[in-house]
Amino acid sequence: MKRGMGMAGSEAAWLTLGFMTLALAWDVVGLDRSFAGLAGSAGGFPWRDHWLPSTVLHDGARRLSWLLALGLCLSVWWPVGILKQLPPGRRLQLATTTLLAALAVSLLKVGSRTSCPWELSDFGGVAHYASHWTLRTDGGTGRCFPAGHAASGFSFVGAYFAFQPSNGAVARRWLAAAVLVGLVLGLAQQWRGAHFMSHTLWTAVTCWCVAVAVNAFWPGDPVAREA
């Protein structure tokens, strides 16, 4: 058991390094505006109000995400499907991590001075581009960093830690699904001009770090402690 937990810890460490490296490398290279230029121009973003990214991948995905989060909360007492494999403590960990990850992203957005791409002069707006790490305003409304909508997928990465002690394969599949959904939703917002790609990557980092922190302080399963 200890060996397995050690292997899981090593895997989580590599995943943490991977998430951080990707987000930092993107910032260092400075690809945000050039990548956004694939979807928009000085005339704006043609896909901004398109039904697929706007109605389906934004409004619909957000509602579905909150329904799934509610389902995870209810599953603490009434588990269904694969969640029955988890002990109550791990189900509570999963629900808690999901809610805290979404909350962390929302709180960061409230204090952000970064405006959305569609507000920038590069894309027909009035704001001027500034790094999301700067403390000065860019002339826009701000509150656009990190990407809140991408958290509809990334906030579920905590399932990796909930399932890892009992079923590593399920843990990895759930993690892959959460990351894939987060990226798809982030790209949809990118194509609408609502976010830069860096916003999406740092949402992934934020949600993952919340999951790591919650797991670090969460009580282990009784069987694991005895082993």
Image (tube, rainbow, N blue to C red):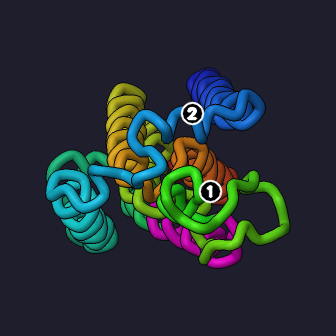
Quarter of the rendering occupied by the C terminus: top right
Three-letter residue code for mark 2: Ser
For image coordinates 69% across by 54% down, the residue present is 129
Q: Nearer the viewer, residue 208 or 32?
A: 32
Image label count: 2
Residue labelled with disc 2:
34
Decide: few, some or many residues near mark 1? Use Cα within 10 Å; few <14, some 14-19, many ≥20.
Answer: many
Q: Main secondary structure of the magenta part?
A: helix
Residue 19, by quadrant, is top right
Spatial CA distance of label 2 from label 1 is: 30 Å
Residue labelled with disc 1:
210
In the displayed structure image, the side of residue 12 where residue 92 appears, left or right: left
Q: Are marks 2 and 1 in contact (CB under 8 Å)?
A: no
In the displayed structure image, the side of residue 22 where residue 186 appears, left or right: left
| Above or below: residue 89 compared with residue 107 | above
Which residues lie in the magenta part?
97-114
Residue 167, label in figure: none
For image coordinates 45% across by 45% down, the residue present is 41
Assign a secondary structure to mark 2.
Answer: helix
